[in-house]
Image: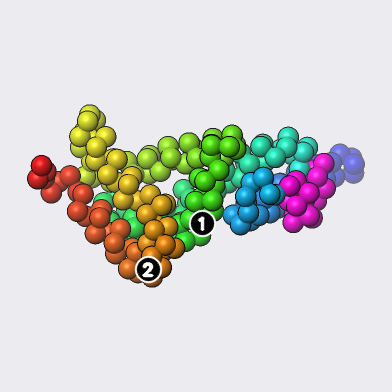
Amino acid sequence: MESGSRRPYRMGARSAAMELTRTRVLEAAAALWMRRWYDDVTLQDIAAEADVSVQTIVNRFGGKDGLADAVADLIASQAAQTRQAPIGDVTAIAAALFDDYERNGDANVLWIAQVDRVPAIGRAAAHARNQHRAWLEQVFADRLPAAGPAREHALNLHYAATDVYLWKLWRRDLGLPREDSERAMRDLLTSIDPRRGSHD
């Protein structure tokens, strides 16, 4: 009876420990890849950062590419949680986006630069683009036209006005304060509101 009652506890504790290890590895890999090129980070580097063995990483993720896919999923889920804003509230939308970019923008730019030579990053970038588009459709649902060419055009404009490279231009290349950069994004988003009418 005693061993039977303890077995679920032991299994639960083991499962919790495995999940903790998995999270530690993911966070270690994400932290390293935010600062360094994909090829420059080895499994040994990640293992040392996470205080686990290389074999543990291989057992959990199958190797470096599998780990990169898992890291991309983690960052995507974090972005989804951060980017919470009421529909149509341009001020809140820009603020939520900047919260994400201020934390992950430099890493996003670093990863995008490697899309053509690292398949795992190519997959992550494609997923991120789809996720960003879906987010734009959600938060700008009040202003986007019905399905068709006009909607696609409006989505393309909103995508350009909220792209991470525009954040990089303002914050890194031009050295603008966040307040001024956010204002610039708000002004762009307001100016491309399809409800304002076309002036072509």
Colour scheme in the image? rainbow
Which x, y percent locates residue 135? 38, 44
- Return the mark for residue 176: 2
Question: Residue 51 magenta-drawn?
Answer: yes
Circle 2 sits in a helix, a strand or a loop, which is it? loop
The residue under label 1 is 106
> In the rendered image, which quarter is residue 69 located in?
top right
- Return the mark for residue 123: none
Which x, y percent locates residue 118? 60, 38
Quarter that holds the N terminus = top right
Between the C-alphas of marks 1 and 2, the distance is 15 Å
Which x, y percent locates residue 44? 78, 49
> In the rendered image, which quarter is residue 101 located in?
bottom left
The magenta region covers 42-56
Amino acid type shown at disc 1: Asp
Quarter that holds the C terminus = top left
